[in-house]
Amino acid sequence: MAEKKFELTNLVTGKKSVAEVKSGTLGPDVLNIASLGKDHGLFTFDPGFMATAACESKITFIDGDEGVLLHRGIPIEQLAEKSNFLEVAYLLINGELPTGEQSAEFTNAIGHHTMINESLLRFFNGFQYNAHPMAMLSGVVASMSAFYHDSMDINNPRHREIFAHRIIAKIPTIAAAAYKHSLGQPFVYPRNDLDYGSNLLHMFFAVPCEPYHIDPVTAQALDLLFILHADHEQNASTSTVRLAGSTGANPYAAISAGISALWGPAHGGANEAVLAMLEQIGTVENVPKYLAKAKDKNDNFRLMGFGHRVYKNFDPRATIIRAMCHKVLAKLGKSDNPLFELALRLEEIALKDDYFVERKLYPNVDFYSGIIYSAIGIPPSMFTVMFAIARTVGWVAHWQEMISDPAMKISRPRQLYTGAGKRNYVEVGKR
Ligand code: ACO
């Protein structure tokens, strides 16, 4: 393939330089601007990373215009139909689908680590019963760095592998402990004879005084939601994990940073915000009023669960979740769920509205996920926690990819300084 180059000219001084254009397997080429400072004394300016690739990665590919999402090259639709969450986790982290033997070994390794240290469990007593579970999750995951600091050499591949197994195994247990704490119910220990989703349902909903029946459709829905949320290339929380991890920080602390970034309503917090929004809208008659608010630049109301930085076409995950939503609600006898009916109508009306059409604003993955979570009995404050459980796999895969790259550098963006020029200190009496 011919080497691609790009000529850059300073139109004031006439100075020219040549920059390398790098091509990936799929997607647009990128301009390597590493020599821009040396050649022209310039940095690039791109707040919000609107046009900047921050790293090279082999994990996930998104074509936002076509609505394509591939994990290690495999379309999300195929994974959603044929795979399961732990197999997708293996694929994302190791690059290939596991053989039967590798799959059994991986599942066994995860099962081996599902319990959390009893001292860690006591951390929950320090939180108020009404503490937001994302705050508990982030705090408790960060504190895991204190438990495993000595046995975590980030340059040791075996240590990294054990870290991956531990965090993927323990995050549902921590999430369930946060939930039980909010209810004042006793903590329920994990059951390693259950699959990942069923074990989570057991830890969330079982109580010591009566048997708990795990509904297979609910467990299947949870597994599907976890597959759909497992990774999404360099999103805000994954980039946060990479940035924190690039300093050589303990990876549990880096994952905790990712959890905090995920919590925001512009990112993973959107699923909780969607449900609150649907409740606020209340009835189909109110939809035009709220659409007008969403379009009004003087009103900070946004249609939550709509729009995406990368997808300017349907989010393929939303299409899959929408179908699953019908199935779960039918199975649970909740097909006439008023929030679901409202969501469908809102989607229909918004998709015909010029404002949303022109800006290519489509429902994203979180438009429907909250409705499924709600139907299976998970409260809105736990929705983003569910997202964090699934996304842990993506965070681990990206952290591993970054740390094992010999060319890794600390992430250290530059800035355009617009503050005061150099000036002298003024004594307090003269200010
Ligand atoms: N409701 C109303 N208007 C919107 C919405 C929305 N949900 N999303 C974008 N717009 C408008 C913006 O006001 C802007 O209009 P303008 O060009 O007239 O100024 C235009 O569409 C472009 O929007 P930006 O905010 O510039 O797009 P950006 O890529 O920065 O933001 C984001 C993407 C944050 C997802 C945004 O669409 C949003 O806030 N959506 C609602 C929150 C949400 O659902 N987040 C979940 C994202 S998916 C995930 O993290 C799993």
Image (cartoon, helix red, strand yellow):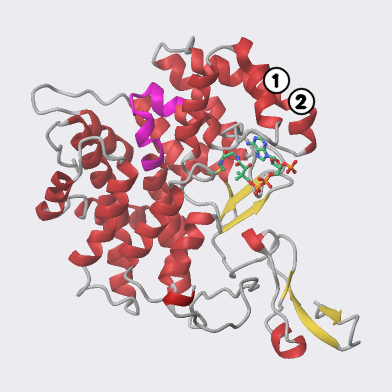
Q: Residue at x 35, y 80 (%)?
A: 155
Most distant residue in the front direction: 429
* Nearer to the camera, 198 or 240: 240
Residue 213: where, in percent of width, then height? 22, 23
Q: Residue at x 28, y 77 (%)?
A: 153
Kindly identify the amino acid type of the residue bearing the numbered disc 1.
Ile
Kindly identify the amino acid type of the residue bearing the numbered disc 2.
Asp
Q: Main secondary structure of the magenta part?
A: helix
Residue 280: where, in percent of width, then height? 51, 21
Report if residue 270 is visible in the image: yes
Picture quadrant where residue 176 is located: top left
Residue on which disc 2 sits:
353
Evaluate if marks 2 and 1 touch, with contact meaning CB atoms under 8 Å apart.
yes
What crowding class fits label 1: few (fewer than 14 Cα within 10 Å), some (14-19), or many (20 or more)?
Answer: some
- Magenta region includes residue 375: yes
- What is the distance, in whole Å, between disc 2 and disc 1 at their CAs? 6 Å
- Magenta region includes residue 50: no
In this rendering, the count of numbered labels is 2
Q: Quadrant of the N terminus?
A: bottom right
Mark 2 within 8 Å of ligand 1, using the beta carbon: no
Report if residue 98 is visible in the image: no
Secondary structure, mark 1, is helix
Q: Which residues are magenta?
A: 371-385
Query: Is residue 334 placed above or below 409 in the rendered structure?
Result: above
Query: Is residue 228 placed above or below 56 in the rendered structure?
Result: above
Q: Residue at x 45, y 53 (%)?
A: 261
Q: Residue at x 16, y 50 (%)?
A: 123
Residue on which disc 1 sits:
349
Residue 380: where, in percent of width, then height? 38, 30
Secondary structure, mark 2, is loop
